[in-house]
Amino acid sequence: MCGITGYIGEQQATPVLLEGLKKLEYRGYDSAGIALQTGQGVVVCKEKGRIADLTKMVDLNVQSTAGIGHTRWATHGVPDRKNSHPHQSQSGRFTLVHNGVIENYLQLQRDYLQEVEMISDTDTEVIVQLIEKLSSEEVSTEAAFRKALTLLHGSYAIAMLDEQDPDTLYIAKNRSPLLVGVGADCRVVASDAMAMLQVTDQFIELHDEEMVLLRKDEVKIFTLGGERMERALYTAQLDQSDLEKGTYPHYMLKEMDEQPTVIRKIVDAYSNESGKLSIDSKVLQAFKGADRLYIIAAGTSYHAGLIGKQYFEKFAGIPVEVHISSEFGYNMPLLSKKPLFLFITQSGETADSRQVLVKVKALGYPTVTLTNVQGSTLSRESDHTLLLHAGPEIAVASTKAYVAQVAVLAICAYACGESDLELKKELSIAANAIQTVLDSKEDVRKVVEETLTDTRNAFFIGRNLDFYVSLEGALKLKEISYIQAEGFAGGELKHGTIALIEEGTPVFALATQRDVSPNIRGNVKEVTARGAKTSIFSIEGIQEEGDRFVLPHVHELLTPLVAVIPFQLISYYAALQRECDVDQPRNLAKSVTVE
Ligand code: F6R
């Protein structure tokens, strides 16, 4: 949440900062700004709105080879110009961008800044005002910066300019992602390497509670205690073309279309030399050594975790609990004797999941992170990482990462057990089935036209694995089309929610599970009798006349991989029909780095 860019070097900073911010827009997009060192002072340009709006406002005639940029997801204060970053100190000497949340900002304001008139409603402004205040007491900006950081409680990624020191960017990180990049004639900083691939693929990881003095040919990393740290460069394994939409109108459509390829890549990545599906032997040992697996995740990743539970229990006989990460911290269950914690997180940055990781690590429990982003915070901080191999997911609504999570969970569980299932073959059948559904987009578009045109709500129902896919279908629909949607276990409807069914209410029912297919069809009859407009999504082998969409046959345990596809497409076409911003829905951000 919130994206930061910074550049200091030989080239003009503005285009690099703006291009970087465009790549970071997935992290937040309610306002944006840049600040440039000009030699005669710092020029700030910021406004409510998207990077495209900022780009139109920026004066390209301003000459500058050092600057910082920010794209915001509001936490403190409404999205408007006054709350947009960069923020400046009272005299204008210091200019700063921040991602994170300063928990003690009101206390700091009371203790240090009573005489300072705050311009914004943000916690960020307190940091920059504090640095100005401390700069009058400390010997250098470096010392004032360090002192201020030691007073902050909370999470931060910070980049700062000092008007009186145009050759330095002041950088700091604690519990919010930030990387330093090393280019041929520049040094850069960004929340995500993809923002700076335009100038370099060489990066340096920063650790929590570190600060950096960045000059055009120098990176000096220090702990907050003042100890100098040396750290090697790594090469970002990202392909610029993965980050582009190409001819697609939306990233979401491109990413949905990539799903068959993602499954095939996963099968390749998790095949050993003899062609058998396998996982790293240390991770395997960790799973096998556990008497209970605790899956911790949020949102779509949580929905994948619910499916993963069935895989681990059925394939490997390992009991599993699945927990919503934001709840786990204050409602920790009684743990088993030998627990293993599995964090599922596309971004690897989700603060809710990370707070659990920090707690269970402190208790000494082993941890594995299943993520799409190598080197992300959760990946670095857990004992083991399993990768999703889905390629960058840019659309805020997760699609290919969900499918990748389900596939990798199936492989891990399978590797831990002794099943006669030919999983490799079944996954390849599932990849082909996904392709078949993707090829039927027009049909799904018609379902949307028939059912969702004038509705204000919709229901997704299913039983067994179909229930979990229904939860995901409802989440997708609400997040990008803003239609109130609920996913329900078919059997639960009559315990209250059926009261909401009225003439024309759309109900999408999944019927891919043979044993419970008659039951879910019974639920469909109940809601149809009360006026609902129902559409059944069944699967070859158990389809019945009148089903709205029949999915190609796949192994019953792998149906979630295929059944989710029409639901993703429904949400996409519903969002288009309502002229919503598909890739950047309101109020959301891709990487949720605040708790
Ligand atoms: C929905 C979506 C979110 C994320 C959730 C967790 O489409 O993407 O619900 O799944 O914010 O994010 P990660 O997986 O990055 O931890």
Image (spheres, rainbow, N blue to C red):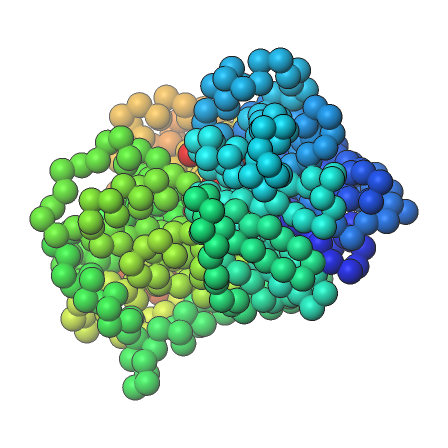
Q: Determine the residue located farthest toward the front in the rendered image.
A: 139
Question: In this view of the protein, which residue sits in the foreground, 215 or 139?
Answer: 139
Q: Where is residue 99 shown, x and y percent of the image?
A: 55, 39
User: Can residue 253 be seen?
Assistant: no
Q: How many marks?
A: 0
Residue 102 vs 203, above or below: the answer is above
Does residue 352 appear to the left or right of 58 in the view shown?
A: left
Q: Determine the residue located farthest toward the left in the rendered image.
A: 337
Residue 480 vs 88, above or below: the answer is below
Quadrant in the rendering for residue 585: top right
User: Can residue 354 be seen?
Assistant: yes
Q: Where is residue 95 shown, x and y percent of the image?
A: 69, 35
Does residue 561 appear to the left or right of 592 in the view shown?
A: left
Q: Determine the residue located farthest toward the bottom in the rendered image.
A: 274
Q: Where is residue 559 shown, x and y percent of the image?
A: 35, 58
Residue at 29%, 58% (x, y): give it: 383
Quarter of the image that includes the C terminus: top left
Question: In this view of the protein, which residue sits in the foreground, 270 or 79?
Answer: 79
Residue at 78%, 38% (x, y): give it: 42
Residue at 32%, 55% (x, y): give it: 382
Quarter of the image that includes the N terminus: top right
Q: Where is residue 269 shown, x and y percent of the image?
A: 40, 74
Quadrant in the rendering for residue 534: top left
Residue at 65%, 22% (x, y): give it: 120
**Quadrant for ligand 1?**
top left
Residue 505 vs 545, above or below: the answer is above
Question: In this view of the protein, which residue sits in the foreground, 461 or 127?
Answer: 127
